[in-house]
Amino acid sequence: MRIKFIDHSFHKRTASSVFFQKILQTMGTVDLAWDDSWQTSHSNINKEELFGYDLVVVWQTDKTAIELCKMGLKNLLFVPMYDGTR
């Protein structure tokens, strides 16, 4: 299984999502992408390439997850931040 893991770029510093990435690695190959939308107000992710993955996981970046849903991406798993999403 090919998995794309889109993470909040601040987590480069905190490494708070590494545990979940390791879980995903037991399911297949995981490609990591850092989303800078929290700094620039728009996502830097190449959204068209995501259609080639079996699963796309968006970790705590609400706006990016919404954009991908609007594009019609069907294999999307969104993991919200407990205190950051309604």
Image: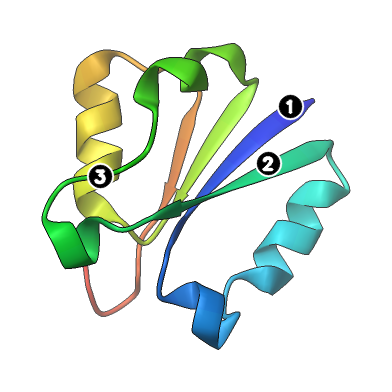
Q: Could you tell me which secondary element the residue under label 3 belongs to?
A: loop
For badge 2, the amino acid type reads: Asp
Query: Which of pointers 1 and 2 indicates the residue nearer the eye?
Result: 2
Can residue 28 be seen by looking at this rendering?
yes
Quadrant into which the N terminus falls: top right
| 49 sits left or right of 21 in the view | left
Q: Could you tell me which secondary element the residue under label 1 belongs to?
A: strand
Which residue is rendered at x = 40% and y = 16% of the image?
Answer: 48
Q: Residue furthest bottom?
A: 14
Task: State whether residue 69 is above or below residue 28.
Answer: above
- The span from disc 2 to disc 3 (Cα, nearest Å) is 17 Å
Task: State whether residue 30 is above or below residue 86.
Answer: above
- The span from disc 1 to disc 2 (Cα, nearest Å) is 8 Å
- The span from disc 3 to disc 1 (Cα, nearest Å) is 21 Å
Mark 1 burial class by Cα count in 10 Å: few <14, some 14-19, many 20+: some
Which residue is rendered at x = 30% and y = 41% of the image?
Answer: 65
Residue 64's image quarter? top left
For badge 3, the amino acid type reads: Ser
Q: Identify the residue under disc 3.
A: 43
Instruction: Give whichever of discs 1 and 2 has the lower sequence position.
Output: 1
Q: Which one is nearer the viewer's eye here, 67 or 35?
A: 35
Q: How many marks?
A: 3
Q: Identify the residue under disc 1.
A: 2
Contact between marks 1 and 2 (CB within 8 A): the answer is: yes
Q: Could you tell me which secondary element the residue under label 2 belongs to?
A: strand
For badge 1, the amino acid type reads: Arg
Q: Identify the residue under disc 2.
A: 31
Mark 2 burial class by Cα count in 10 Å: few <14, some 14-19, many 20+: some
Q: Residue furthest left?
A: 41
Which residue is rendered at x = 67% and y = 34% of the image?
Answer: 3
